Image: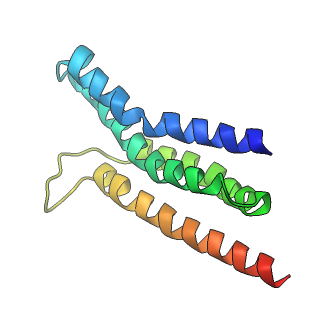
């Protein structure tokens, strides 16, 4: 039980560190070559997708196991789905007014994940207290 929580913390922490990998690739390897630049943007996008999961996994470390278990099932579904959507999204040149699909996904999926996580945790805690 504690091992699963530690494993989730490690996985989400590594995913959230993707921004460091992206910065490393950009600064040391890429020199703004197009293929490598796309990989850099993917790592940074994944980091933004994993960041809320990492923060929630820190918080869930102190919750009861049944609450953690329900939330972790959601995470195991959400993170791969988010990464697939990020890979499939077009990366056309957007801007501030008309962002690309990938930029919209990186912006909105963490917000949706956070809202669903808070609702799922709240409902689980509330119904667990009543039973």
Give the quarter of the image for residue 109: bottom left
Considering every residue shown, the one lying at the far top of the view is 29
Q: In the rendered view, does 97 fall on the left or right side of 105?
A: left
Q: In the rendered view, does 82 fall on the left or right side of 61?
A: left
Considering every residue shown, the one lying at the far right of the view is 131
Quadrant including the N terminus: top right
Task: Say which residue appears at 58% left-offset and 74% top-offset.
Answer: 119
**Quick one: 71 or 1, which is closer to the camera?**
1
Query: Which percent across, then down, holds residue 86?
Result: 42, 46
Q: In the rendered view, does 115 fall on the left or right side of 105?
A: right
Considering every residue shown, the one lying at the far bottom of the view is 130
Q: How is the image coloured?
A: rainbow
Numbered-mark total: 0
Task: Say which residue appears at 31% left-offset and 54% top-offset.
Answer: 101
Considering every residue shown, the one lying at the far front of the view is 62
As drawn, 102 above or below 25: below
Residue 112 seen in this snapshot: yes
Q: In the rendered view, does 64 fall on the left or right side of 85?
A: right
Residue 36 seen in this snapshot: no
**Quick one: 123 or 112, which is closer to the camera?**
123
Query: Which percent across, then down, holds residue 15?
Result: 49, 37
Task: Say which residue appears at 59% left-offset and 36% top-offset.
Answer: 10
Query: Which percent across, then down, holds residue 42?
Result: 36, 36
Quadrant including the C terminus: bottom right
């Amino acid at each position: 039980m504690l091992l699963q929580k530690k494993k989730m913390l490690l996985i989400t922490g590594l995913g959230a560190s993707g921004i460091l990998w992206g910065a490393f690739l950009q600064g040391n390897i890429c020199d703004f070559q197009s293929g490598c630049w796309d990989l850099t943007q993917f790592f940074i996008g994944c980091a933004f997708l994993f960041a809320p999961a990492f923060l929630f996994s820190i918080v869930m470390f102190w919750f009861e196991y049944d609450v953690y278990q329900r939330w972790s099932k959601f995470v195991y579904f959400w993170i791969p789905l988010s990464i697939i959507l990020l890979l499939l999204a077009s990366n056309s040149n957007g801007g501030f007014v008309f962002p690309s699909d990938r930029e919209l996904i990186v912006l909105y999926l963490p917000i949706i994940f956070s809202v669903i996580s808070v609702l799922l945790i709240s409902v689980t805690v509330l119904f667990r207290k009543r039973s």
